[in-house]
Amino acid sequence: MRLYVRPMRSILAAVCLFLTAVWSLSARQVPITIVHTTDLHGHVLPARDYDGTEGLGGLLRCATVIEQWREETPNLLLVDCGDLYQGGMESYMTQGRIVNDAMAWLGFDAWVLGNHEFDWGIDVLSATLEHGTVPVLAANVGVREGLSNPLPQVRPYIIRDIDGVRVALIGLTTDAIPNWSRPDLLGDIIISDSVESLRSILPEVRAQRPDVLVLLLHQGYRPFGDNAANQVNRIARNFPEFDLIIGGHSHQPIEGVLVNGILYTQAGYYGIWLGKARLVYDTVARRVVERDATLTHIADKYPPHEGLREALRADLERAERAAAVEIGSAAEPLQPRARTTGQSGIQQLLCRAIAEAAQVDVVLHGTLSDEALQAGAIYERDVWRLVPYENTIGIVQITSSQLQEILEDNAELLRSPQFMGVYGIQYELHAYAERGQRIRNLRLADGSAIHPRKRLRVAMNSYVLASGGRRFPAARRMADDPVNRLMMTGIDTRSALRDYIQRHSPLAIEVEEAVRLVRSPE
């Protein structure tokens, strides 16, 4: 018996040594790099940041860095987290086609629908996606039951094989799109809850046997808690199996934070930051064993990529020529902010342009950026700086009491950039009072009383009429009530402003105290 056991032990030892050698040869740690952009807003050309610095970011500068990283880095994926088309002149003038062409040239692997993708309406979006070749993701975008899908290109996820490692890229957009876009823009598209959408699709994803799970998200991280539009914390709590979440939407550069143990990163806006997330997958442990994230600031030390510029030359030159067209002049500087509550030179310029274009009694509107107009020539590029969004003008016919309800919602935003100034009316805002008592002495601009049964033609932009991200629920309620006869004029704010400047130059805007702020009981 002893003579039998000893050889068996030797054989087992030899087998173990053999298997160990085979294991050592086959065991690998596979690096995977995911380069990411977000909230490009159509900026192929370098852009201006929120501090006023010119010539930053844009896909042309990003392309130079992407090419360098590709040469240095194996196993690289390139993705974008949404709000891709709307914003830059070069994209607007081609209905997004130039961005599609740039992404195809750069070899993007996937991108996620953002809320601003719907700003031109579902028909334009459908045509723009039809032109594109890069996979577009959004697991929570669907169509009403029984209807044909106008966005068949949108899929919930894709699987990429990276050096033998299967990487699942799953996309989600923000749930809050219907709070920003009127139904006429969305058509038959429905946006579902993020968590429920992931619960629905993940069994199908797992059946594909992915090794790495990455969530591409058009939502932003809020360290002090989620809101209706940004649910990163909720998603991370419900799905701790994700190895990485790459976000967007909030325009914040976030190099890397852990959210419920998941690495989260976000690359700011306009391509001014380029993100790089690095994962290392261990083929024996069958899990990600290393992960980190960095952001690179895309400043003028990175020149625009000449090859990409040449590929897009005709469209870029057309946009650059259009931006340089002089359309009028200002007799004096106009500022976006003023001591008078909600009323500034820029705010009044926008309101007067809308009032004239839509032929209305009253306009409720704020500034759309922190851009000023200096005295002297006004160029087409200045109009785009003042109006960076594709809002259109709608008119509701409402009574003074209904108007007061909207102004009460507005009062909640008194110290925020979303606070709207007015045109065609005046009122007192008693900031100390309870809701329902803050708006007093509402009158027409000339001081005359408003008959309680008179219906005023009130203009607001499409964003506010969709509730402005739930900031203006009364405006949405008024717009949805057929009694108030909402009319979407089809007039976009930018065109109304351009036409007004051309008709009234040199501009001289006198700002009146239409909103009298009362801070304490008199």
Image (cartoon, rainbow, N blue to C red):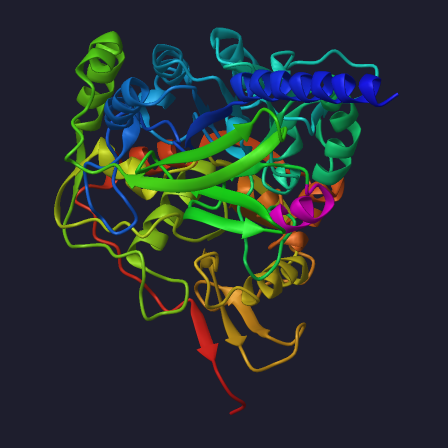
Magenta span includes 236? yes
Residue 263 vertical placement versus 4 (above, below): below
Residue stretch rendered in magenta on the structure: 231-240
Residue 354 seen in the current view: yes
Residue 452 vertical placement versus 397 (above, below): below
Residue 355 vertical placement versus 105 (above, below): below
Q: Residue at x 65, y 37 (%)?
A: 178
Helix, strand or loop: magenta stretch: helix
Q: Is residue 290 left or right of residue 330?
A: right
Q: Residue at x 54, y 90 (%)?
A: 521
Q: Is residue 183 left or right of residue 310?
A: right
Give the camera-side residue of 62 and 230: 62
Give the camera-side residue of 123 and 159: 159
Magenta span includes 136? no
Extreme-right residue of the structure? 1
Give the camera-side residue of 168 and 195: 168
Extreme-left residue of the structure? 376
Q: Residue at x 19, y 15 (%)?
A: 317
Percent of width and height locating residue 125: 54, 18
Q: Residue at x 32, y 60 (%)?
A: 344
Q: Is residue 275 left or right of residue 297?
A: right
Percent of width and height locating residue 2: 84, 23
Percent of width and height locating residue 101: 37, 11
Residue 362 seen in the current view: no
Give the camera-side residue of 388 and 46: 46
